[in-house]
Structures are given as C-alpha cells and as structure tokens.
Amino acid sequence: MIGFASWVGALCMMLAPFIIDTTAGKMLAIVGLSMLTLQAIKGKLWNLVALNLTGIIGYCYAIYF
C-alpha cells in the first residue's frame, strides 16, 4: 500500500510544477509530499521526512499568506 501511495505522490510532484502558481498546484504538491513522507518514514529516512515536512509547511504558508 505504501508503494502505491509513493507512486501517486511522485506523480503529484511531477505534475505540480506546471500549475504551482495556482492553489490547486500547491495543494497537489502538499498531497504529493505527504504521500512521499509515508515512504520516507517506512525507510527511516529522517532527513527526507524533515525536507518533506518543511515543503508541506512552505506550501501551506504560500496558500494562506
């Protein structure tokens, strides 16, 4: 299940840059990073978890401010 979520997350991250100026693009990036974080947690790749969480926070900030 995590493998499937990781592929969907990667797909979201591949599509997001083309519409990143829109709210939908930022939301797509947030969803993608969230799904990729599951894989990073499973692999105990804490540096990637930290990067993904920072990205999620940054995109949330960009949406609301």
Image: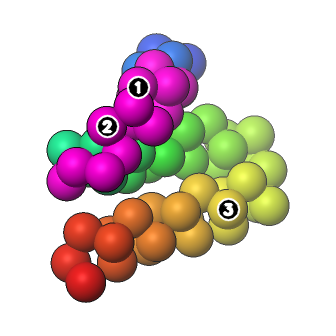
Which of pointers 1 and 3 lies earlier in the amino acid sequence?
Answer: 1
Magenta-drawn stretch contains 20: yes
Judge by depth and name the residue closer to the eye, 61 or 42.
61
Residue 50 in the image, given as x and y percentages of width and height? 68, 67
Can you tell which quarter of the image residue 65 is in?
bottom left
Q: Quadrant of residue 31?
A: top left
- Label 3 crowd (10 A; few <14 / some 14-19 / many >=20): few
Secondary structure of residue under mark 2:
helix
- Residue 35 percent coordinates (x, y): 45, 39
Colouring used for the render: rainbow
10 vs 57, left or right, is right
Residue name at image x 59 percent, y 57 percent: 52
Disc 1 to disc 3, how far (Cα)?
Answer: 19 Å
Asked if residue 15 is positioned above or below residue 42 in the image, the reply reads above
Disc 1 versus disc 3: nearer the observer:
1
Q: Nearer the viewer, mark 2 or mark 3?
A: 2
Q: Which residues are magenta?
A: 10-23
Residue 15's disc is: 1
Image-based side of 2 in relation to 28, left or right: right
Disc number for residue 19: 2
- The amino acid pointed to by label 3 is Leu
The answer to whether marks 1 and 2 mark residues whose Cβ atoms lie closer than 8 Å is yes
In terms of depth relative to the viewer, which is nearer, 30 or 42? Answer: 30
Callout 1 amino acid:
Leu
